[in-house]
Image (cartoon, coloured by chain):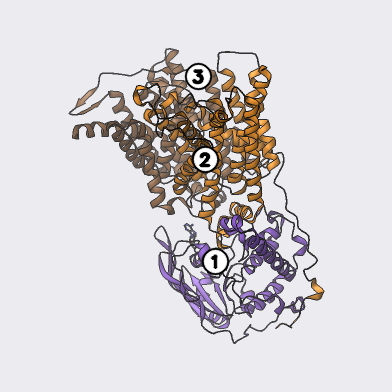
Chain colours: A purple, B orange, C brown
C-alpha cells in the first residue's frame, strides 16, 4: 500500500477561511485534467426492479458533482454501486483509469475511493480518535501480518496516523470530542466524523450521501467551505443532497435522477429550469 | 493426597480451560462481532485430535474403541495437533459461514453446524467411536516428567494456567493492537469498515481461525486431563456457558472475561456438586442448564455490556501537534 | 435401485410434510416479527410432550394432536407477550432478540429435561398396517401427515390472500409503521400470527413424534436445523417457498439415509442450505440489518 503523495493538504486552508458562505457558484477552475471517476450505464436492480437504470457520470479532478432527485430516485443505490456496497447488474466503473467494476469495497477504497453513508456509519463503540486512525490510508491494523511481523513499521504508521488525525480534528474543530464514543455524538458531529474519516484516506474521489442532514445550520456553511477547500487539491466529489441551496453553492455540475434514470444534467441554473425536473419534483 | 487438593486443582484446570475458551470467544464476539454459536465444535475438534494422536494406532473394529488418525505423537505435537485441528475446522466452516450474510443467519448457521456435527460424530462410529467416545487418553508431557495428569493434578493445574497465561498475553496484545482496533471497527459498522479499506472477509476469517486454534488447544488440554471425550461433553449448550461467562463479566473487557469465567462455569457448574443429592440423578445437571439460560436472559435484559464494560481508550493531544495558532496559513478562496 | 430410490423418496415426502408444517409456522412468524426464533424447536417439544400426556391421560390421539397444537400456540403467546415484549420495551436489537430466544430455548429444553427425568418416552399411536403402492410403503398416518401439510398450506395461503387479517398481516410484514398509520392494529396482527405459528409448531411436534414414535427433551432441538434451513431456503415469509424447500430437504435427507449414509443424512439436507447461501447471497444479505422488530 503505497501512500499517495498528493492529498488534501490541511495547511492550504486555515480556520480563518471559514468565512461566511460565499454566494457565488463555486468554480475554482484549473483542475479538470482528465476524469478521476467514470461510471458508464450503471444498472442496479432489486429483484427485477431497476433502482438505477443506465446512469453515467464522469467526475474530473477538483470537480464537485451533485446528484439530486426525489426520494427513492436511486441516488443512494447509485453511490452504493460506485462504492461496491450494492451489487451492480450492469455498466462499468473506472477510478483513475482503472476498471473497478467488479472490485470489492475495500479494494476500491485502497485505490482512492472514500464514501459516507446516508445513515451515519460512525464506529459507535470506538472513540472519535479511534474512528479516525482506524480509517487512515496507512492503518497498519488492516494487516495482521504487518502488525505481528513488523512492529517497528506498525509503530511508525501509528504515529503518522495519529499526527494526521490531530491535524484533521483541528481542521474541523472537533478536538474536544476525541475521547467521545461514536454513539455519544450528535447527528451533525457524526457526519463530520464520517467526512474526517474519509479525509484520513487522502482519497482521489469522495462520495457523500446527504452529508448535511443533521448538521447545524451554522456548520453547514463551514462544511461547504471545507469541501471547497478539499477539492482544491484535485479531489473529485460526488454529493447526493436534498438541500438545493447547498447544491447551488457547492456543485459545478448537477445530475438529476428520477425513477432510476438521469432526467437532466448541467449547471444548477440549467437543471432547475428544466421542465422535466420540475415535473419530477412535483409528481 | 487429599481430596481437597484434587478438587481445587480440578477447578483450577477447568478455570484455565474455560479462560482459554473465554479469551477466544471474546476476541471473536467482543472484538470482531462474529457470533460463533458453534464454538464448542472447535474445542471438540481439538479434544478429539489430541485424543487420537495420544492414544496410538486404532485397533479398528475389533478393539473396544475405533477412531481415525490413530498415532502416538510426542509432546508438544499433541497440543499443536489440537490447535491445528481447531484452526482447520474453523477455516473450513468459516469459509462458508462467514460470507456476507445477515448476522442472525450467520449465528443460526453456526448453531446448526454445532447440532449437526454432534449428530454426525455420534452416529459415525468409525470416526471417533460414536456416542461412546474415546477413553484412555494420557498426558504426553507428564510421561516425560514421569507423572500422570490425575496423579499430579497440581502440576497439571500449573501447566494449564501457564498456557492460559501465555495465550492470554498474546491475545491481549493482539486485541489492543491496530489489528484489534480494525476488528472493532468491523464489529461496529461492517460497510463503513470495508469502505475504509478493511478487508472484512479476511479479518473475519483470521479471527475465526485464531479463535478456533485457541479453542482446539483448550480442548486438547481438557482431554489430556480428564482422559476421555465423547459427544456428551460438547452439546450445543456448552457454547452458551462461555457466552454467558463473557456476558456476565463484560463483553470486550478482559478483566470481565476473567471474572465471568470464574463466576459462571465455576459457580454454576462446579459448586452445585456440593449440594446434597436431590431428586433423581441428573436433576441438578438439568437445573444448572436452566440457570445458565436464565442468567443469559437476565444479562441481556439488565446488563447487555456485562459487569465491566469495554474500556475507553482515551488520548490526550500530544505536545508536538501544532495548535490552532501555529497552523501555517496560505490563505483560502 | 430405482425401487429403493422411490421408497426413500416417499419417506422423504413424509419427512418433508413434517418439516413443512413447522417451517410454515416458523416462516410466518419470522417474516412478520423479524426475530429468528431459536426457541421454536423447544415449543415443538412442548407440543410433543402435551400429546404424550394426553395419551397417558387416555385421550384420543387426534385430540392429543389438537392439544399439542394448542399448547404450542399458548406457549408461543406466552413467550412473545411475556418475554420478548419485555426486551422489546428495552429497545433490544433484533439480533439480541435472537439471543434471548436462545436463552429461552435453554430454559425450556432443560426445564423439560428435569421434569421428564431425562428419559425417552415411547409414543406409539395411530399406527396401522402399511399401505403398499409398488415399492412405496406408507402407513395411513403418514399419508394423513402429508395431506395435513397440503391442507395447511392451502388454507393459510388462502387466508393470507383473501381475508382482511391476511392483508393486514402482509402489510405489517412489509412496512409496519406504514401499516400502523393506516389504522392496522399491528399488535393484534402479531398476536394472531404468534398464535397460528405456535399452533403449527406444536402440531409439527406431535406429528414428528408420531412419526419417530418417541419424545424426549431434545426432540425439537434436533429438528430445528431442518426448520430454519427450510424457512431460509424458501425465502423468509413465503409459505410456498418453505414447503418447496421442505420437500427438497426431506427427499435429499431420506435418499441419503436410504443409501446407507444415515449418519450424514441431516448433513445432506443442510448442505442444500449452504449451497443456496453461497449461490444466492442476495437472498440473504443486503439491507437486512435495517429491518425492524415488530412485536
Ligand atoms: N436493499 C433494497 N432492496 C430492495 N429495494 C431497495 C433496496 N434499497 C433500495 N431499494 C429501492 O430502490 C429504490 C431506490 O432507493 P435509493 O435508496 O437508492 O433512493 P434514494 O434516491 O437514495 O432515496 P432517498 O432520497 O430517500 O435517500 C427505492 O424504491 C427503494 O425502495
Ligand atoms: Mg438515499
The answer to whether dots 3 and 2 both sit on one chain is no
Q: Is residue C105 visible?
A: no
Compute the Cα span from label 3 to label 2: 37 Å
Residue most toward the bottom? A30
Compute the Cα span from label 1 to label 2: 38 Å
Q: Quadrant of residue B24?
A: top right
State the residue position of label 1: A109
B48 or A125: which is nearer to us?
B48
Disc 2 is attached to a residue of which chain? B
Q: Position of residue C225 (x, y in %)?
A: 43, 36
Q: Quadrant of residue A22?
A: bottom right
Number of marks drawn: 3
For numbered disc 1, what is the local secondary structure? Answer: helix
**Figure check: C6 above or below C131:** below
For numbered disc 3, what is the local secondary structure? Answer: loop
Q: Quadrant of residue B327?
A: bottom right
A228 or B169: which is nearer to us?
B169
**Figure check: C133 above or below B181:** above
Identify the residue at image location x=22%, y=31%: C4
Q: Which mark, residue B80? A: 2
For numbered disc 2, what is the local secondary structure? Answer: helix
Disc 1 is attached to a residue of which chain? A
Q: Position of residue C117 (x, y in %)?
A: 52, 17
Instruction: Please state if B157 lies on the left or on the right of B282 as rendered.
Output: right
User: Within 10 angstroms of label 1, few (less than 14), some, or many (20 or more) residues?
Assistant: many
Q: Position of residue C154 (x, y in %)?
A: 35, 38
Q: Is residue A281 visible?
A: yes
Compute the Cα span from label 3 to label 1: 56 Å
Instruction: Please state if A278 lies on the left or on the right of A244 as rendered.
Output: left
Q: Which mark, residue C118? A: 3
User: Within 10 angstroms of label 2, few (less than 14), some, or many (20 or more) residues?
Assistant: some
Amino acid at each position: 500500500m503505497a501512500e499517495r503523495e498528493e492529498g488534501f493538504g490541511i495547511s492550504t486552508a486555515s480556520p480563518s477561511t471559514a468565512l461566511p458562505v460565499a454566494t457565488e457558484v463555486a468554480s475554482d477552475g484549473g483542475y479538470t485534467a482528465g476524469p478521476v471517476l467514470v461510471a458508464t450505464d450503471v444498472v442496479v436492480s432489486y429483484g427485477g426492479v431497476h433502482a438505477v437504470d443506465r446512469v453515467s457520470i464522469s467526475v474530473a479532478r477538483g470537480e464537485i458533482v451533485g446528484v439530486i432527485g426525489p426520494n427513492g430516485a436511486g441516488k443512494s443505490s447509485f453511490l452504493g454501486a460506485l462504492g461496491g456496497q450494492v451489487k451492480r447488474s450492469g455498466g462499468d466503473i473506472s477510478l483513475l483509469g482503472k476498471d473497478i467494476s467488479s472490485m470489492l469495497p475495500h479494494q476500491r477504497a485502497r485505490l482512492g475511493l472514500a464514501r459516507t453513508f446516508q445513515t451515519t456509519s460512525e464506529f459507535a463503540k470506538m472513540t472519535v480518535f479511534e474512528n479516525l486512525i482506524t480509517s487512515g490510508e496507512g492503518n497498519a491494523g488492516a494487516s495482521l501480518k504487518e502488525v505481528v511481523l513488523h512492529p517497528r513499521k506498525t509503530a511508525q504508521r501509528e504515529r503518522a496516523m495519529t499526527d494526521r488525525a490531530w491535524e484533521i480534528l483541528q481542521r474541523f474543530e472537533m478536538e474536544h470530542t476525541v475521547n467521545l464514543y461514536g454513539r455519544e455524538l450528535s447527528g451533525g458531529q457524526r457526519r463530520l466524523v464520517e467526512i474526517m474519516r474519509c479525509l484520513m484516506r487522502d482519497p482521489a474521489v469522495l462520495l457523500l450521501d446527504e452529508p448535511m442532514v443533521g448538521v447545524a445550520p451554522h456548520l453547514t456553511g463551514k462544511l461547504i467551505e471545507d469541501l471547497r477547500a478539499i477539492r482544491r487539491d484535485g479531489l473529485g466529489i460526488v454529493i447526493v443532497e436534498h438541500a438545493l441551496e447547498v447544491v447551488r453553492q457547492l456543485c459545478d455540475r448537477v445530475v438529476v435522477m428520477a425513477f432510476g434514470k438521469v432526467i437532466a444534467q448541467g449547471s444548477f441554473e440549467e437543471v432547475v429550469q428544466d421542465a422535466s425536473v420540475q415535473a419530477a419534483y412535483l409528481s | 493426597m487429599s481430596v481437597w487438593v484434587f478438587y481445587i486443582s480440578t477447578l483450577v484446570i477447568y478455570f484455565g480451560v474455560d479462560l482459554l475458551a473465554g479469551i477466544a470467544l471474546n476476541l471473536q464476539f467482543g472484538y470482531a462481532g462474529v457470533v460463533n454459536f458453534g464454538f464448542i465444535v472447535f474445542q471438540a475438534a481439538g479434544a478429539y485430535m489430541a485424543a487420537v494422536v495420544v492414544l496410538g494406532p486404532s485397533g479398528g473394529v475389533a478393539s473396544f474403541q475405533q477412531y481415525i488418525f490413530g498415532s502416538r505423537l510426542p509432546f508438544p505435537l499433541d497440543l499443536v495437533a489440537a490447535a491445528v485441528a481447531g484452526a482447520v475446522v474453523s477455516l473450513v466452516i468459516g469459509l462458508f459461514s462467514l460470507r456476507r450474510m445477515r448476522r442472525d443467519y450467520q449465528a443460526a448457521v453456526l448453531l446448526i453446524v454445532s447440532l449437526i456435527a454432534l449428530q454426525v460424530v455420534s452416529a459415525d462410529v468409525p470416526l471417533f467411536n460414536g456416542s461412546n467416545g474415546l477413553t484412555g487418553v494420557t498426558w504426553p508431557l507428564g510421561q516425560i516428567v514421569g507423572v500422570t495428569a490425575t496423579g499430579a493434578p497440581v502440576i497439571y493445574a500449573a501447566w494449564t494456567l501457564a498456557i492460559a497465561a501465555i495465550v492470554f498475553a498474546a491475545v491481549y496484545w493482539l486485541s489492543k493492537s491496530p489489528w484489534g482496533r480494525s476488528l472493532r471497527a468491523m464489529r461496529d459498522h461492517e460497510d463503513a469498515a470495508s469502505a475504509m479499506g478493511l478487508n472484512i472477509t479476511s479479518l473475519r476469517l483470521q479471527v475465526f481461525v485464531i479463535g478456533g486454534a485457541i479453542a482446539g488447544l483448550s480442548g486438547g488440554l481438557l482431554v489430556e486431563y480428564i482422559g476421555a471425550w465423547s459427544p456428551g461433553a460438547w452439546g450445543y449448550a456448552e457454547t452458551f456457558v462461555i457466552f454467558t461467562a463473557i456476558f456476565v463479566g463484560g463483553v470486550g473487557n478482559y478483566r470481565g472475561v476473567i471474572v465471568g469465567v470464574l463466576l459462571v462455569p465455576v459457580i454454576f457448574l462446579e459448586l452445585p456438586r456440593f449440594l446434597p443429592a436431590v431428586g433423581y440423578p441428573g436433576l441438578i445437571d438439568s437445573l444448572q442448564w436452566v440457570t445458565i439460560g436464565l442468567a443469559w436472559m437476565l444479562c441481556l435484559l439488565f446488563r447487555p455490556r456485562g459487569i465491566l464494560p469495554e474500556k475507553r481508550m482515551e488520548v490526550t493531544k500530544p505536545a508536538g501537534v501544532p495548535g490552532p495558532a501555529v497552523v501555517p496559513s496560505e490563505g483560502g478562496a | 435401485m430405482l425401487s429403493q430410490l422411490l421408497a426413500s423418496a416417499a419417506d422423504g415426502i413424509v419427512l418433508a410434510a413434517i418439516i413443512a408444517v413447522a417451517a410454515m409456522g416458523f416462516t410466518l412468524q419470522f417474516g412478520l416479527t423479524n426475530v429468528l426464533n431459536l426457541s421454536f424447536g423447544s415449543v415443538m417439544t412442548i407440543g410433543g410432550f402435551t400429546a404424550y400426556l394426553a395419551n397417558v391421560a387416555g385421550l384420543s390421539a387426534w385430540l392429543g394432536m389438537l392439544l399439542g397444537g394448542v399448547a404450542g400456540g399458548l406457549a408461543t403467546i406466552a413467550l412473545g407477550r411475556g418475554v420478548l415484549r419485555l426486551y422489546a420495551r428495552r429497545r433490544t436489537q433484533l439480533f439480541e432478540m435472537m439471543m434471548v430466544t436462545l436463552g429461552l430455548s435453554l430454559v425450556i429444553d432443560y426445564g423439560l429435561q428435569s421434569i421428564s427425568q431425562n428419559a425417552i418416552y415411547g409414543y406409539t399411536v395411530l399406527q396401522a398396517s402399511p399401505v403398499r403402492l409398488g415399492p412405496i410403503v406408507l402407513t395411513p398416518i403418514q399419508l394423513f401427515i402429508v395431506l395435513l401439510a397440503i391442507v395447511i398450506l392451502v388454507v393459510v395461503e388462502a387466508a393470507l390472500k383473501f381475508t382482511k387479517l391476511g392483508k393486514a398481516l402482509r402489510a405489517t410484514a412489509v412496512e409496519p409503521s406504514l401499516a400502523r398509520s393506516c389504522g392496522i392494529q399491528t399488535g393484534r396482527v402479531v398476536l394472531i400470527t404468534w398464535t397460528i405459528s405456535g399452533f403449527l409448531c406444536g402440531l409439527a411436534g406431535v406429528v414428528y413424534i408420531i412419526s419417530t414414535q418417541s419424545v424426549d427433551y431434545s426432540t425439537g432441538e434436533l429438528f430445528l436445523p431442518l426448520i430454519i434451513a427450510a424457512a431460509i431456503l424458501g425465502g423468509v415469509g413465503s409459505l410456498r417457498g418453505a414447503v418447496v424447500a421442505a420437500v427438497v430437504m426431506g427427499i435429499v435427507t431420506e435418499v441419503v439415509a436410504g443409501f446407507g449414509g444415515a449418519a450424514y443424512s441431516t448433513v445432506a439436507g443442510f448442505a442444500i442450505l449452504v449451497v443456496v447461501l453461497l449461490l444466492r447471497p442476495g437472498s440473504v444479505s443486503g439491507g437486512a440489518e435495517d429491518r425492524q422488530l415488530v412485536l
